[in-house]
Image: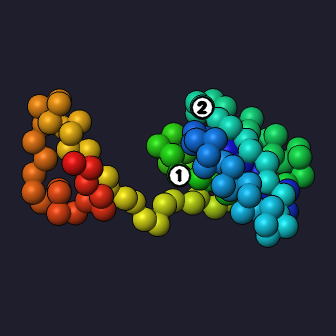
Amino acid sequence: MLAISQPSLIPMRSTSKHFQALQDCARAHGIGLELRMAATSEEITPAIDAAKASAVAGVNVLSSPLLFANRRIIFERAAAVGLPAMYQSPEEIELILNLKTAKALGLTIPQAILDRANDVIE
């Protein structure tokens, strides 16, 4: 989860590279950013409560299967403690296929899938 000091976010699992990019972008726009992590559904409410205790301006829930499955809990808890919240999902998804690995695994990728790939690694 992320919490924004002047707005904040709530991601669960992502790469440190992804978080670094978020922090760099927030800093460039003069926005404070706090990470609130939750690896299980039981950790979501305490993460929101910790964000509220830090006096953040809001919560931005980043896309993950865990957070999507628990979005009702997230928004109900955020509302209960008076934190604005939004769910952020990716706007674009890239499909990259590694044909060498597929061949090593004995997989055949259908042409229709190959045609939709953004990148194909031979």
Task: Check contact, mark 1 vs mark 2: CB within 8 A.
Answer: no
The amino acid beneath tag 1 is Ser
Q: Which residue is mark 1?
A: 63
Q: Residue at x 51, y 40 (%)?
A: 66
The residue at 39%/60% (across/down) is: 93
Q: Is residue 83 above or below residue 15?
A: below
Q: Position of residue 115 (x, y in %)?
A: 17, 63
**Which residue does the numbered mark 2 point to in the structure image?**
39
The mark that comes first in sequence, 1 or 2, is: 2
Residue 93 appearing in the image:
yes
User: What is the C-alpha distance between the residues marked 1 and 2?
Assistant: 13 Å
- Residue 33 placement, left or right of 68: right
Q: Secondary structure at mark 2?
A: loop
Q: Position of residue 39 (x, y in %)?
A: 60, 31
* 44 sits left or right of 84 in the view: left
Where is residue 67 drawn, in percent x and y? 55, 45
32 vs 109, nearest the viewer = 109
Q: Is residue 26 left or right of residue 44?
A: right
